[in-house]
Image (spheres, helix red, strand yellow):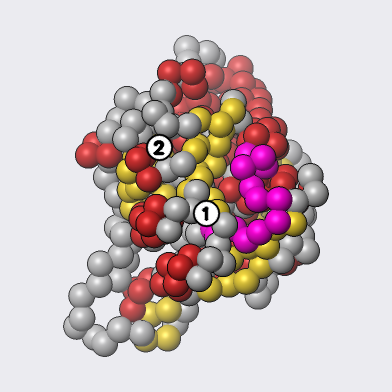
Amino acid sequence: MNEDKTIWWNDENKSIMIIDQTLLPNEYKTVEIKNVERLAEAIKRLEVRGAPALGVAGAFGVALAAVTCESDAEFPETIAEAAELLKSTRPTAVNLAWGVDKVVKSMENLPPEMAKFLALTSAKSIADNDTKMCMLLGHNGAKLMPQIGSVLTHCNAGALACSSWGTALGVIRSAVKGGRKISVYSCETRPLLQGSRLTAFELARDNIPVTTIVDSEAAFLMRQGKIDAVIVGADRITSDAVFNKIGTYMHAVCAKHHNIPFYVAAPTSTFDFDAKESDIVIEERSRDEVANLFGKKTVPDGVDVVNYAFDATPLDLVTAIVTEKGVLYPPYDFGSLK
């Protein structure tokens, strides 16, 4: 068990270890993953989730397919099938495909034994760099947080969404570490409650004051002057929009109306520089996630449910974007990040 990591490689067993996030906060359990099919299931079930963590998962998944392939003749096909399967599991989050493609590229035109070595080396490097990136991102964003005040966040952009430390929560952690007196409002984040189950879990564990609210309460608290800033993560950033957990756009609109800064924290691997909002397919998830919350029926049989996993927030609602390379302000010019 590695309590400082969300996802890591087990050298002894040639397998991937993850924290099963579907069980938190009731149970902390690690899961060993020994094949790509099981990893794809874990990604679909949100046992492992969060844009940066999915990048690491994709990288380790390709490496797993490589090191466990016993046939040199079938090696190219095995890698191609693994890459395609992994990328198909979460179509909106760009980091997953980014991690997969980086490891696949590291093996190009190499014999299997050398390809296996470089695949694992590349995947481990992606995981290590993710932690370094989060620390840099946190440092860069800490200055944006109030010296004393309350910050709203949505979904989970913490250590559980990365290899460690976090993006939006990494900024908050870095600010607190630097002496700022910050308390957090964590939106519960329907339908799967990543805010109340995961974000509140992380912050309480770190002794950072946190209060969970229902998603629809945020605007009322803004109007009362109880929220000084909003900071969220991102699953993809295009040239004109930020894609993040459904509900993010609502918070951005409300923050704009109440003159509250709205920040996005994301690594450069989350930027899809050549795409626009209209190019992106937003993942729709099952009716059951909404209609049967943790096994209890919450919607009558026969009633339709729309369950988009993400929404798109136009960049004109974003006050600043925090990356590991620095803080970007409007008008956004992403050329320096390429």
Q: Quadrant of the N terminus?
A: bottom right
- Residue 46 in sight from this viewpoint: yes
**Residue at figure coordinates x 61%, y 21% from the top left:** 118
Q: Residues within 10 Å of mark 1 (few under 14, many from 20)?
A: many
Image spot of residue 216 (x, y percent): 41, 72
Q: Which residues are magenta?
A: 141-153
Q: Earlier in the sequence, mark 2 or mark 1?
A: 1
Q: Nearer the viewer, residue 225 or 80?
A: 225
Along the line of sight, the residue nearer the viewer: 209 or 125? 209
Q: Is 173 rendered above or below residue 58?
A: below
- Residue 191 in magenta stretch: no
Quarter occupied by residue 273: top left
Which residue is pictured at 74% across the width and 57% down the height? Answer: 181
Q: Position of residue 61 (x, y in %)?
A: 53, 39
In-front residue for pair 28/230: 230
Residue type at tag 2: Ile
Q: Residue at x 53, y 66 (%)?
A: 225
Tag of residue 230:
1
Residue 237's label in the rendered image is: 2
Residue 143: in magenta span: yes
Q: Which mark is residue 79?
A: none
Query: Could you tell me the amino acid type at mark 1?
Result: Val
Q: Residue at x 62, y 61 (%)?
A: 150
